[in-house]
Image (cartoon, rainbow, N blue to C red):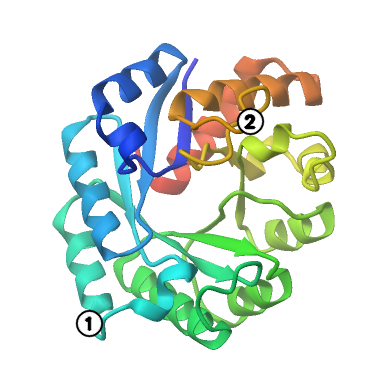
Amino acid sequence: MILIDTHAHLYYDSMYDRLDDVVGDAAEKHVHKIICIGTDVSSSKQSVEIASQYEGVYAAVGIHPHDSNDVDSNYIKELEALASSSEKVVAIGEIGIDHYRNLSPANIQRKIMIEQMELANSLNLPIIFHNRDADDEILNVLKENAFTKALSHCFSSNITFAQQLVDLNILLSFSGNVTFKNSSNHSAVENIGLDNFVLETDCPFLSPHPFRGKPNEPKRVYDIALYLSEFLEIPIEKIADATSKNAMNFFNID
């Protein structure tokens, strides 16, 4: 059985200081591939460096909406250089829009997301997008701007929005919050097919139940898969096979 963590931030001190153990512990829980996601130029560089050290780790480079107001004027060139520096860079992300915290102005968030979508197109790479309290605007951006492939990171909306994304051939990703009682995304995971989603931790955040509140790690993908196996009444091996196939196809990795 092979599981893939499609969204991890391995450069946080809680994991970066013991990466060998983190990657090894993940493998013991059948998590053999991890995508390390940048949120600004600095963490994107770290993601590429980490990916170069481990066979099963890959990288995405991008500017998170929280950081979009602080980018340098040449940030696109910096991301382009990073993406071109290694075959292990498999996506542009984490991009997107966040109207929950609004740490950057709304118009800047949208502008930076679209610019990174254009970069992804020029490099023939997929995008990984963050969406919090921004369903309508995200949908508008995705409909009005071209992309090759897109992944909705940490999907947290309902089946209506899920279906709208699936209709655009966008892949959904479920994290530890799908295991929370009364989670808003239960209707989505119940009603979309196994070919429409992947798994992630978003570590060190969003540890799944019963580890909620504790630092998260890639090994917890197993716990998310186990929960979905029980919730959907599907063998965990089938969950693992489908989500890993989806992730490998999306990121174009073996």
Label placed on residue 253: none
Is 180 or 215 nearer to us in this picture? 215
Percent across and percent down for residue 45 are 21, 55
In the picture shown, does residue 58 fall above or below 254? below
**Mark 1, residues whose alpha carbon is within 10 Å: few (<14), some, or many (≥20)?**
few
The local secondary structure at tag 1 comes to: loop
Q: Quarter of the image for the C terminus: give it.
A: top left
In the picture shown, does residue 174 fall above or below 225? below
- Which mark is in front, 1 or 2? 2
- State which quadrant residue 232 falls in: top right
The local secondary structure at tag 2 comes to: loop
Residue bearing mark 1:
74
Percent across and percent down for residue 138 are 63, 72
Is 85 or 45 nearer to us in this picture? 45
Q: CA distance from mark 1 to mark 2?
A: 39 Å
- Amino acid type at circle 2 is Arg
Is 19 or 32 nearer to us in this picture? 19
- Amino acid type at circle 1 is Asn
Percent across and percent down for residue 122 are 32, 73
Q: Earlier in the sequence, mark 1 or mark 2?
A: 1
Q: Is residue 125 visible?
A: yes
